[in-house]
Image: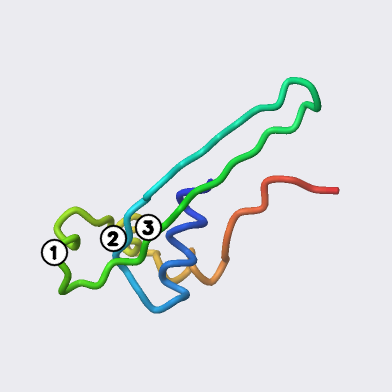
Amino acid sequence: MAFRTAAVEVIRRGHDLFIIQGDTTGYDGWSGIDEQGMVVQLIDARSPEAKDALSARQTFGADWQKLVQEGAPITCTN
């Protein structure tokens, strides 16, 4: 879910290439809180990092426009 959300936001910001710089997941057994965090770096197609970057559009495939329009998945309800 987090990866899909990252790809949607990369495209919405007018980019395609990105790298996950950090991924932190933690569980606090005392309070029962499960935390997640991800650091996403946008990559310019002309930069040296582009060869190692992920393509948000390729991640979604041919239906990428529909998936971006749907937005980030909702994982919790109140």
Q: Name which of mark 3 and mark 2 comes first in the sequence.
A: 2
Residue bearing the label numbered 3? 60
Q: Position of residue 65 (x, y in %)?
A: 43, 71
Q: Amino acid at mark 3?
A: Phe
Q: Amino acid at mark 1?
A: Pro
Q: Are marks 3 and 2 in contact (CB under 8 Å)?
A: no
Which residue does the image show at 47% across and 57% down from the upper left?
6
Residue bearing the label numbered 2? 55
The numbered mark at residue 48 is 1
Which residue does the image show at 37% across and 50% down from the upper left?
20
Q: Are marks 1 and 3 in contact (CB under 8 Å)?
A: no
Single out the residue that lies furthest toward the top: 29
Single out the residue that lies furthest toward the right: 78
The foreground one among 65 and 28 is 28
Q: Name which of mark 1 and mark 3 comes first in the sequence.
A: 1
Q: Is residue 78 above or below residue 45?
A: above
Report how far apart the C-alphas of labels 3 and 2 lie in the structure.
9 Å
Q: Are marks 1 and 2 in contact (CB under 8 Å)?
A: no
Label 2, secondary structure: give it: strand
Label 1, secondary structure: give it: helix
Q: Is residue 2 above or below residue 15?
A: above
The foreground one among 30 and 56 is 30
Q: Amino acid at mark 2?
A: Ser
Which residue does the image show at 47% across and 53% down from the upper left?
4
10 Å crowding of disc 3: few (<14), some (14-19), many (20+): some
The foreground one among 67 and 40 is 40
Q: Nearer the viewer, mark 1 or mark 2?
A: 1
Report how far apart the C-alphas of labels 1 and 3 lie in the structure.
24 Å
Label 3, secondary structure: give it: helix
Q: Nearer the viewer, mark 3 or mark 2?
A: 2
